[in-house]
Image: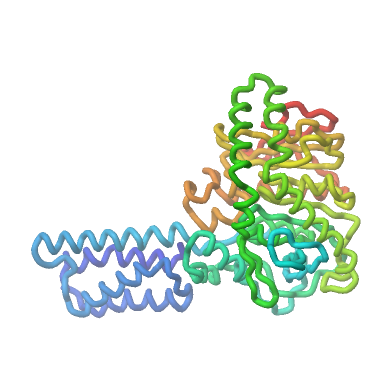
Amino acid sequence: MRILEIILLTISTIFPFYISIKGYQLNKKIPLLIIGGVTVIHFVFEGYRWQMIPTYLLVLILGWCLYKEYPFFNGGWIRKTIRGIVLILLLLFSWVLPYILPVFNLPKPTGKYNIGSQYIHLKSTQDEIMTSDIGDKRELMIKAWYPAILDNEKAEPYLNEGDRVSFAVKHGLPKTIFNYLDIVKTHTYIKPSVAIGKFPVLIFSHGSYSQASGYYALIEEIVSHGYIILNINHTYESTGTLFPDGEIKLFNSEYDRKQNNQEMAEMAWNAMQNYNKATTPEEQFSTVHSLILNYYGAELTERYSNDISLVIDELKKWNTSSFLAHHLDTTKIGVFGHSQGGAAAGQALLDNDRIKAGINVDGMQWGKMIDTIMTKPFALISSEWDDSHPNLNIQAYHNGSSSDFYNAKIKNSGHSSFMDIPLMINLPFINEAGTINPRKTYEVTTKIVLQFFDLYLLDEHSDLLELSNKYPELELTKKTRKKLPNILR
């Protein structure tokens, strides 16, 4: 919570008891001026947000009581009890709502570059398989984050309208519920010029049914160190995609239900029953081999990887005739992603020769990886999964790598620890971010990502394993050989 919000809440908590116990021994103008003054200053300098409505209501009630010189707790015990219950409920909501859904501060980037962003509308000639419209072609929106030269540009609002509205629709909430995010300050500016020079290109892929650009804490830090990040919004796969004409294409739940159907559920159930009964690594591998190859997640992984390739196909054109012209170092392309996007990063390394290195951030590696040897530098960054959650990545990466392969685990973190969700929702059992301070997860993750790509794209010497000594929250191992038996947690 912000300072004036805390002061207003404290006053609202104390005054009902004060005016009931002390009565009006002091001039009523003094407490009225205090409450009114703090409220006005709050609105002017911090701004209204709906989470404070119970507090505003309480302020009005207290103002009326003061003006009328009417004790809050007045009358018989029944009346006092009812008013006490009402007061407790108002105070409960007054303190809890702003705490759970705070106006948060994003981590301040530590790199030398300012950060700009612009959107790119990619129209492909590939058929769109996720709709039934004849002749519909695959279209993507890509948010380009880049090192920038500022010239009085404004900072962009946190999350665009498509991310906000679709996130509300996903959870059955009013479409205006996230308007308060306008108060959140970002470190990204609207359409400034790109900084002088050429920069390595990182393609970022989001998780399935998540906000495509809800990763400010990670992305801003990485861009500030001299990378251009092309943040793909996988149409019909994110919560929603905002197009230049204002249309928002939401997650295609109908297509998802048809593909991720009862057959898939039974496949997963049967495989996991057999997996839990297996007594050797070989038996475990055989029980889930078909699942990892054929489960719906494998289709998603292929589709995401295809979108990544569509973006890479456009780089040459964008490097000659767009705001990014002459700033893209197309010889230094990396890929990373979170959850389903992390799996896509691994798959893209197999599918596209132009990608030099990749990172999977807490994604289950569905698809062809299980029958393939990784040949490029790769890192798997994982949260600390619950013991009841089977770690099938052990099997997915069974064949190992002929290049450098890193396995990192951030202790006490959760699946959403790599998103901005823990900042938006300040309640661990809801935000699925574990018990770790979310800012520590961002710090550790960005250190790994930056040192990894500095090493494998820029050839800058870096010993990633030293990070384990710096961060007790991190477990990090490296293998450089063809076979990787059981190196993953």
Asked if residue 485 lies left or right of residue 182, the reply is right
Q: Residue at x 82, y 60 (%)?
A: 310
Report the residue that reaches farthest toward the top: 279
Residue 257 image point, x, y percent? 60, 52
Farthest residue in the left direction? Answer: 76
Q: Residue at x 68, y 68 (%)?
A: 188
Q: Is residue 274 left or right of residue 25?
A: right
**Residue at the image position 68 percent from the left and 26 percent from the top:** 284
The quadrant holding residue 100 is bottom left
The image quarter in which residue 139 lies: bottom right
Q: Nearer the viewer, residue 407 or 131?
A: 131
Residue 356 shows in this picture: yes
- The image shows residue 134 at horizontal and vertical percentages of 74, 67
Which of the image's four quarters has the N terminus? Answer: bottom left
Q: Position of residue 224 (x, y in %)?
A: 74, 61
- In this rendering, the answer to whether 215 lies above or below 417 is below
Coloration mode: rainbow
> On screen, 176 above or below 201?
below
Q: Is residue 359 left or right of residue 415?
A: right
Residue 373: % across, % down: 84, 35
How many numbered marks appear? 0
